[in-house]
Amino acid sequence: MTKMKTNKIKLIAVVFAIFGITSFASAQKSYTLDSKSTFSVAGTSTLHDWEMKSASGTGTANLTIANSKLTEIESLSVTLLAESVKSEKKSMDKVAYETLKTDKNKNIKYVLKSAEKVNETTWELNGTYTIAGVSKAYKTTVKTTVTKDGLNLQGSNKITFTDFGMKSPTAMLGTIKTGQDLTIKFNLNFNL
């Protein structure tokens, strides 16, 4: 073998080695939603503002984190047991579950369709919420933070009851009415 061919083979071997190491360092990995994740829905009524919360969602995300930076969100899904969302009043919870039609629709779901990086800590997600058995696509701007265990993702969406085929609840024979507008908020931790 000539010296030139030997050098060329060594160069190719080095390029493959570097490429292999780079691919390994930024490989996509599967992360799981942890128990510190929180969800809430907030709204108004003729009596007072209200908020219902849950911390019992499950989910997974396929992410690429390289050099402590999020470089890709390939997939992300979250499922929340509808009756895990609670207020401070059981009577309000009962009305909420009737509105959510939890007898037939046990879960609230979110499934990512696509994700686009805006800057180092902001991403725009396109995904589908399924609430009360109705699915609707939304754009969501989220703040991301790479943690020692994975990724924290925070954001919110403005929705309405009618978006998901629900009637805004009433109480006290209709004297207390809930406003149409709702805000879904989430603080998600996806860890290896």
Image (cartoon, rainbow, N blue to C red):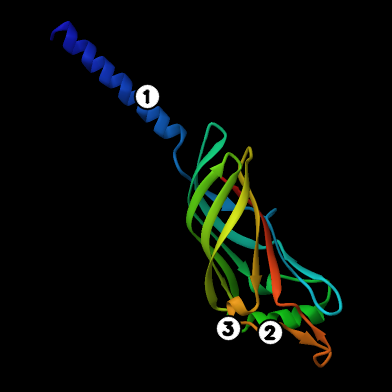
Residue 7, image x, y percentages:
23, 11
Return the residue found at the far left.
1
The vertical placement of 106 against 57, above or below, is below
Q: Amino acid at mark 1?
A: Ile
Which is more N-terminal, label 3 or label 1?
1
Q: Residue at x 56, y 36 (%)?
A: 69
Q: Secondary structure at mark 2?
A: helix
Residue 76, image x, y percentages:
52, 56
Cβ–Cβ under 8 Å for marks 1 and 3: no
Q: Which residue corresponds to mark 1? A: 18
The quadrant the C terminus occupies is: top right
Cβ–Cβ under 8 Å for marks 2 and 1: no
Q: CA distance from mark 2 to mark 1?
A: 58 Å
The vertical placement of 113 against 122, above or below, is below
Q: Secondary structure at mark 1?
A: helix
Report crowding for label 2: few under 14, some 14 to 19, many 20 or more residues within 10 A (C-alpha). some
Q: Which residue corresponds to mark 2? A: 98
Relative placement, left or right, of 11 versus 151 is left
Return the residue found at the far right.
47
Which is more N-terminal, label 1 or label 2?
1
Q: Residue at x 69, y 80 (%)?
A: 97
Relative placement, left or right, of 118 versus 113 is right
Q: Amino acid at mark 2?
A: Glu
* Quarter assignment of residue 81: bottom right
Q: Which residue corresponds to mark 3? A: 104
